[in-house]
Amino acid sequence: QGGYGHPDHIQAHRVAMYGALLAGASTFREDLGEAWSVSKIYWSAFPRSVLRAGIEALRASGDDSDFARIDPDDLPFGVHDELITTVIDASDFADRKAEALRCYPTQVETESGLFAVWLSDPAAFGTEYYRLAYNCGARSEQGPGAGRVERETDLFSGL
């Protein structure tokens, strides 16, 4: 569903997943070289605990918008925390991420609301969360059903 259901993100997800499938199809486009198997595929994720903390901070700021009244468990894009396999510290890039968001004022409100709360906390805004959706041939023991508690901190671990 492309993260949170935005049509562009849904299509990007479809294209990426189909591209991974076609990469391994030896008869797809021989002119592109030999087929190969994608080792890992990650899906970006919004942990419910992070959504809950953001909404609680929004409420504490006095915001009474519809979003502040939402139960994070009712957000369809929220992911159960135990499904998060990978947590990346991207705090060095939080400023650029915020700057990019501000380029879309008709889609994302950054001066008030949830994004304003998150933008005010570089530690929260500078962390990226993922689900390891596919792991073939990687040496990582992370991922669904792997039985590991530790989370990856590098998208390229095991490759």
Image (cartoon, rainbow, N blue to C red):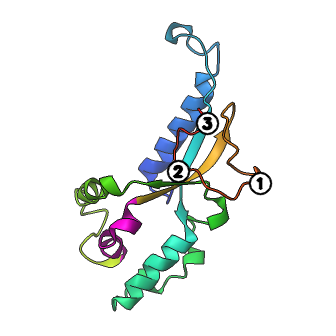
The residue that label 2 is drawn on is 153
Image location of residue 77, percent across then percent down? 55, 64
Q: Amino acid at mark 1?
A: Gly
The residue that label 1 is drawn on is 147
Magenta highlight on residue 57: no
- Which residue is at a point 55% across and 49% down the rendered structure image? 43
Cα gap from disc 1 to disc 2, whole angstroms: 17 Å
Who is closer to the viewer here, 51 or 82?
82
Image location of residue 106, percent across then percent down? 26, 63
For the record, the magenta segment spans 114-126
Q: Main secondary structure of the magenta part?
A: helix
Position of 34 relative to 20 (above/below): above
Cα gap from disc 2 to disc 3, whole angstroms: 11 Å
Q: Which mark is residue 158?
A: 3
- Which residue is at a point 35% across and 58% down the rendered structure image? 91
Q: Earlier in the sequence, mark 3 or mark 1?
A: 1
- Which residue is at a point 37% across and 75% down the rendered structure image? 114
Q: Amino acid at mark 3?
A: Gly
Q: Quadrant of residue 120?
A: bottom left
Position of 127 relative to 68 (above/below): above
- Judged from the image, the secondary structure of the residue bearing numbered disc 1 is loop
Image location of residue 102, percent across then percent down? 23, 61
Image location of residue 39, percent across then percent down? 62, 32
* Category of crowding for the residue at label 1, using alpha-carbon neighbours closer than 10 angstroms: few (below 14), some (14–19), many (at least 20): few
Marks 2 & 3, CB-CB < 8 Å contact = no
